[in-house]
Image (cartoon, rainbow, N blue to C red):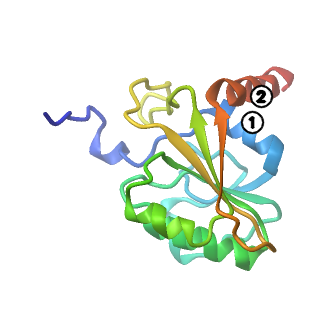
Amino acid sequence: MTLKSNTLASDKDCWQTPLWVFDALDIEFGFYLDAASSHQNALCAHHLTEQDDALNSEWVSHGAIWVNPPYSNIRPWIEKAAEQCAAQHRPVVMLVPEDMSVGWFSKALETVDEVRVVTDGRLNFINATTGKEQKGNSKGSMLLIWRPYIAPRRMFTTVPKHALMAMGSKVREAA
């Protein structure tokens, strides 16, 4: 049985990261650039949109780089993240579906320093059309983390969803 998505085709690759996830990771990495966004869903003041053609642009940044890529074609984003981590001398953190059986994951393992799997629940992304949290994510999530100046260690770590939520929520409350 195939499940049919109710998401508009034009919105399929436009889901926003939940703010508490971004905030929790921003504490750790200090993001400067959102490299895969729209003007509506950007999480950093400095961001690249589809019109900026991020895959064919330099990701000039004065801090870490955040990427929640279009899930319809992740592989070129993996390649670009590795390239830009080295070129910009900045960490790159990418949020992707937790699926280690796909070719892009093997490609990521060639260059990534850390694979951080989100455990104990699935993330609910923000719907591009409604701006509301959308339940029903069919996969778990993981973070691919590139760090400059070190040989990729290909570490596997985990972080519970509730720990990210607690950290990110504290940031929201303090703001």
**77 with respect to 47 (left or right):** left
When the figure is inspected, residue 171 is found, relative to residue 100, above or below; the finding is above
Q: Residues within 10 Å of mark 2 (few under 14, many from 20)?
A: some
Q: Which residue type does callout 1 highlight?
A: Ala
Q: Which residue is mark 1?
A: 24
Front position in the image: 60 or 2? 2
Q: Residue furthest left?
A: 1
**Rendering coords of residue 27 (x, y %):** 82, 41
Say whether disc 2 or disc 1 marks the residue closer to the N-terminus: 1
Looking at the image, can residue 53 be seen? no
Please count the marks in the image.
2
Q: Which residue is mark 2?
A: 167
User: Residue 152 sits in which quadrant?
Assistant: bottom right
Mark 1 lies on a secondary structure that is helix
Q: Residue furthest right?
A: 174
Front position in the image: 43 or 76? 76
When the figure is inspected, residue 52 is found, relative to residue 8, above or below; the finding is below
Name the quarter where the C terminus is drawn. top right
Looking at the image, can residue 156 be seen? yes
**106 with respect to 111 (left or right):** left
Q: Residues within 10 Å of mark 1 (few under 14, many from 20)?
A: many
- Going 38% across and 55% down the picture, which residue do you hit? 101
Name the quarter where the N terminus is drawn. top left
When the figure is inspected, residue 21 is found, relative to residue 58, above or below; the finding is above
- Alpha-carbon span between mark 2 and mark 1: 5 Å
User: Residue 24 sits in which quadrant?
Assistant: top right
**Do callouts 2 and 1 mark residues in contact (Cβ within 8 Å)?**
yes
**Rendering coords of residue 75 (x, y %):** 44, 66
